[in-house]
Amino acid sequence: MSAIDTFNTTRLYDIAHARAGDKGNTLTLSLFPYNPKDFDLLKKQCTAARVSEHLSEIVSGKITRYELPNLPALHFVCENALLGGVTTSTAIDPHGKTLSYALLAMEIDAEPLRDVLKNQP
């Protein structure tokens, strides 16, 4: 029995993986569903507003979301997230590479996933 069968919520890491990058003080996060069928679910539940709320202790600037349906992926550009950027930051991870895990810890509604799993062979 999986967490999806037991709880009303699950975390993004159960259905997606992520990559992080940086450009100055801007963090970029890309989110890829393990199963392309889950892309619509990610689009509905991973809005810029929800990601901004989830990362509010890390990102002090605006978060913009871009949809990349041909991949499929969501790309988030997070301004003012790296304490000044790699050349000035005193953070342990000035490139922000580990911050993809912060995104993957975000909770989402598991109910739509139950419907998808029921329809899989």
Image (spheres, rainbow, N blue to C red):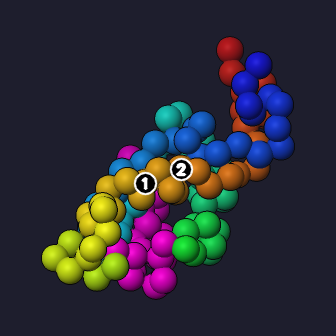
For residue 72, say whether it is visible. Answer: no
- Mark number displayed over residue 104: 2
Mark pair 1, 2: CA separation: 6 Å
Indicate whether 54 appears above or below 5. below
Q: Residue furthest left?
A: 87
Q: Amino acid at mark 2?
A: Leu
In this orientation, which residue lies closer to the viewer: 78 or 81? 81
**Kind of element beneath mark 1:** helix
Q: Amino acid at mark 1?
A: Ser
Image side of residue 99 versus residue 115, left or right:
left
In this orientation, which residue lies closer to the viewer: 25 or 49? 25
In this orientation, which residue lies closer to the viewer: 68 or 42? 42
- Mark number displayed over residue 100: 1
Q: Are marks 1 and 2 in contact (CB under 8 Å)?
A: yes
Q: Point out residue 115 in the picture as x, y percentages from the top left corner.
A: 79, 34
The verdict on residue 73 being magenta is: yes
Q: Point out residue 113 in the picture as x, y percentages from the top left corner.
A: 73, 38
> Residue drawn at (75%, 33%), measured in percent from left and top?
4
- Residues in magenta, as a range: 58-82
The verdict on residue 88 being magenta is: no
Mark 1 closeness class: few <14, some 14–19, many ≥20 residues within 10 Å? some
**Kind of element beneath mark 2:** helix
Mark 2 closeness class: few <14, some 14–19, many ≥20 residues within 10 Å? some
Image side of residue 6 versus residue 98, left or right:
right
Q: Point out residue 14 in the picture as x, y percentages from the top left corner.
A: 60, 37
Q: Could you tell me which quadrant the N terminus lies in?
A: top right
> Residue drawn at (37%, 53%), measured in percent from left and top?
98
Q: Could you tell me which quadrant the C terminus lies in?
A: top right
- Mark number displayed over residue 83: none
Image side of residue 111 versus residue 120, left or right:
right
